[in-house]
Image (tube, helix red, strand yellow):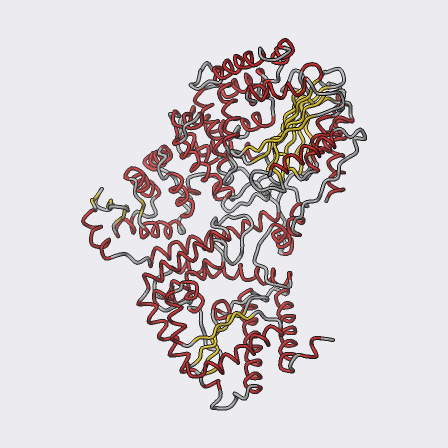
Amino acid sequence: MNSAIRLRPSVLKAKEMLAEGRAKLRLQHDQGSPGVQVCTRLTDLFDQVVLDLFEAALVDLGEDGPKGLASKLTLVPHGGYGRRDVAPYSDVDLMILHHPSVFPRAAELARRMVQDMSDVGLVLGHSLRTPSQAMSLGLTDATIFTSLAENRYLTGSVSLFRTFADQFRFRASRRFRSLFFGILQARHSERVQYGDAVYLLEPNLKRSRGGLRGIQLVRWLGFARCGEVEIDSLSLLGLLSDRDRQILRNARNFFLQLRNEMHFHAGKSNDQLDRGEQLRLADLYGYAGTKGMLPVEQFMQQYFLHSSGVRSVVSNFIETIRPRSILYRTLAPLMTHRVDRDIYVGPSMISTSKRWKVDKSGQVPEILRLMDLANLYDRWIDHSTWESIRLRMQTIGEIQLDDEGRKRFLSIMSQPPRLGELLSRLNELGVLEKIIPGMSHAKGLLQFNQYHKYTVDVHCIETVRCATKFQDRNDALGEAYRSIRSKRILHLALLIHDLGKGFEEDHSDVGARYALETAAKLQLTPREAESVRFLVQKHLVMSHLAFRRDTTDKDLVVRFAVDVGSPELLKMLFVLTCADFDGVGPGVLNDWKVRVLAELYRAAMRHLGVELEGESSTRTRNKRERLQQLAQKQEDEAWFQRQFEALPPTYFKETPAEQIVDELSQLRTLPADEAFVSSTYLPDRDIVEITVGTREESVPGAFHRIAGAVSSLRMSILAAEINTLVDGLVLDRFYVIDQDSSGAPSAERIEDLGVKIRKIVLDKNDKPPNFRARWTSKASRTAAQVQVLPTEVKIDNDTSEQFTIIEVFAHNRVGLLYAIARTIFQMGLSTSIAKIATHLDQVVDVFYVSDESGQKIEDEHRLQEITGRIREAVEQFRAEND
C-alpha cells in the first residue's frame, strides 16, 4: 500500500509545498542567486511548513481558538534555523516554549509535530521547555547556549517569548566570563573532531576551522558580551572593524553558496568538502587553471583565503572581548617595566603605548624590533598591539627595508625560541609577504594530493617550526642542528624552499630565484646568498638519493659530497630535508627515515674530511666480529664465511647479526623448489617486515612474484629490498602496512600470511594474482582519476657504473609494483635493487636493472622500448583496476 495514503491531508499539502519550494529555490540557485538570499527564502519556506503543520495539529487536537495552546506556548526557531541561514537539507531546530501549567498538552502537540515533520521530509531537532528550564540549561551548558543565542519568534504567545528572550539576554551578560570560556572549550572540542588546522585539505564547511562555525562563534560571543548577534551591530559597537565585518560578510556569502550547492547536488545534508567535491565545484564554477596550477587548486586557494581571513578575524575578536581577572589587572602594571617610552615588558606580555600604535604600527622595522624583543624576553605580544599592526598592514603596499629592518629580521631568523609562532603571526598579519618574495603567491595555495596536509605558505613556516624543535633531539639530527653556526641561513632557506610551487617551471628553480631576490633584499653576503640559493634549489636532492638510490655506492656519495662542498652546508641540507618531511604532517618523519638520511649524511661527511661522533664504523666492526663468532658455531663455517663476505651492504647494515645467521641457515638447508617466509611486526614504525628466501633457479622472477603475493593479501608495500646472495640464493624483504590489522597483527594472521605468500610464490603458472579491491568512497574514486602528474618513466644511466636505473612515477594502486616488476622480468632484465617510495596516493618505484649478461643497457632503441613497455603496463593496469 502506498504510504502517502495514510498521511494526513495537512501533511500531504506541506510535503508538496516543501518539494515545490525546494525545486524553485534550486532553480534560483542554479541561476546564480546569492547564498544568503537562497538561505533566507529556504527559511521562509520552512517557516510556512512548520506554521501549517502547527495550525493543523491545533485543530486536530482541539486546541485552536483564543484559549487554546497557542496562548500558552511559543514556537522558537534557534540555531541555524533561528539565524535564517538554513541549507536545503538542514535540520530544523525548534523549541516549544510553554507555560508550566500546559506541559501534558504541549507534550502531545510536540509528539504530533515530530511525526508530521518527519512525514513531510524535514528532520526536526526539537525541545520542550519552560522559560525557566530553557534559561537554566542555556546558561550552564555552552552547547545549548550557542543554539539558544540564535533565537527568534515564529508564532504563539508574544509575551512568553519576549519574557524569555529579555531575561536570557540579561542573565547571559551577567555570566559572560564563564560563558566565554565554556563556548571556546566547546568550539575547541568540535574543531579537534572536524579539523583543527585552517588548512585541512578536506575541510568541513560548517565545522572546520575558519568555516561557518567561526563566523557563528563571533555571533555567540557577541550575544554573551552585549546581547547582539548580528555582525553589523557588533561593528557599530566598535567590537569589529569595518574591514573585519566585510571579511566575515564575504566569507559567509561564499560558504553559504557552496553549502547550498553541495546540499542540492547530494539531495541530502552534505558539508564535507572532500576531494571529489572540490573537483566538481572547481569545474562548475569555471576555474580554468594554469600550466602550473590545477583548476581545483585555484578554487581551493579561494576557499583557504576566505577561511584564513575568518580565522584571523575570529582570533582578534576573541582577544578583543576576552575577560581579564581583577588580580591580573591589578598586578600586571606592578610587574611591568619600560624598554623605552613606548614599549612595556610585563609578566607575560609585551605591550605598546597608544603613540606607538598610531605612529609605528605600520613601520616594518619597528614591528620586527618588537618581535625581536618578544624573542629576547620570551614573551607574547599583546592583542591590542597585534590588532593595530594588522589594520595598518591592510593599507600598506610594497615596502623597502632599511638597514635596521634588515638587521631586525635576520636577528629574528637567528633565534629558535618562538620563531615558528612569530612567523605564523607575521604571515597572518600580511607582514611576511612584504619581506619574502613569493609568499603572497603561496598564501592559501593547495597541493592537490594526499601527501601534503597544509597549503604551501603554512608548510614552509611549519618546516621552520619543526627544525627549531630538532635542538632537543639526542641523535645525529639534533647534533647537526645545534652545531649549525648560521641558523638564520637554514631558517631562511626553509621559509623559501617551496614558494616556487604553482608555476609551470620546476618549483626548485623558481624558488632559487626567490632565494636570490630575498638575499638581495636582506643584503646578505655573496656567500650567504649562494648558500640560501643552493639549499632551496637542492632541497630535494638528499631525500632523492637516500630513498631512490643505492647509497652504498661510494661513487654516488662522493659526487653528492662534492656537489654540496662544505660540512656546514651539508649539515643544513640534512636538517632541511628532515624538516621538510616533518612539516608535511604528523608522523611523516619517523625514526627510520632519520636513520636512513643520517647514514647518507655521515657517509658524505667522511668524504668531506669530517669524522662524526657515533660513526657507524664501530658498529660495523662489532657486527663483523659477532658474525665470526656465530659462524664458528655452524656446521659449515666456510659456507657462512663465504656468504658473509658477499652480503649486500644494505642487508648487512640493517639486519642484526643473529637474524642474518638465522636466515642464512634457513636458506642453506632449503630444499629445491621451496621457499621460506617470515613476518615480524615492527612497533616503532607500525609496519610489518616480510622476508622471503628462495633460490633463483626455483623461482624465476622471484621479486615480482613476491610483490604480487604480498599485494594480493591486502598489504600496502612501503619499501622493498632485493638481496641476491652467492650460490644463487635470494632473500627479499618487504616493509608493508597490513590493511586488515590495526597495530600488531595476530599470530594467526602472521602465520596465515606466510602460508599464502609461500603458496603464491611457488605457483609454477606465474599467473597474475587477484588483487582484492579496497573500498573507497565515490569522492575518493573521483579524486583518484585526477593525477597531479601523469605516469612518467625515466631512465638514469649516469648515476651507477653497473646498472641502468629506471624510475616510475605513478598514481598508487594495489598491485602496481607487481605489474611493473613483472614487465621488467618479461623484458629479460634482472632487478638487483629496488627502492619503493609511497606517499599515500603517489608512488615512485626505482629499479636498478641489468641485461642477461649483467651489463647496463646502453642501446638507445632498447632504452626507448623499456620506457614504452613499462608506461604501457602501468596504464593498462590502471585501466583494468579503476
Residue 487 falls in image quadrant: top left
Where residue 12 appears, x then y in whole percent?
Answer: 65, 79
**Direction from residue 478 to residue 39 in the image, left or right:** right
The residue sitting at the bottom extreme is 66
Where residue 814 appears, x then y in whole percent?
Answer: 68, 39
Q: State which quarter of the image contains the N terminus.
A: bottom right
Is residue 86 depicted above or below 630 in this figure? Answer: below
The residue sitting at the left extreme is 334
**Direction from residue 16 to residue 589 in the image, left or right:** left
Q: Residue at (33%, 70%) from the top-left corner?
A: 171
Is residue 459 depicted above or below 261 in this figure? Answer: above
Q: Residue at (46%, 32%) from the top-left corner?
A: 493
Residue 449 falls in image quadrant: top right
Where residue 105 appears, x then y in whole percent?
Answer: 49, 83
Is residue 326 depicted above or below 676 in this figure? Answer: below
Where residue 791 appears, x then y in whole percent?
Answer: 69, 36
Is residue 478 depicted above or below 778 in this figure? Answer: above
Residue 114 falls in image quadrant: bottom right
- How many numbered circles does the render carry? 0
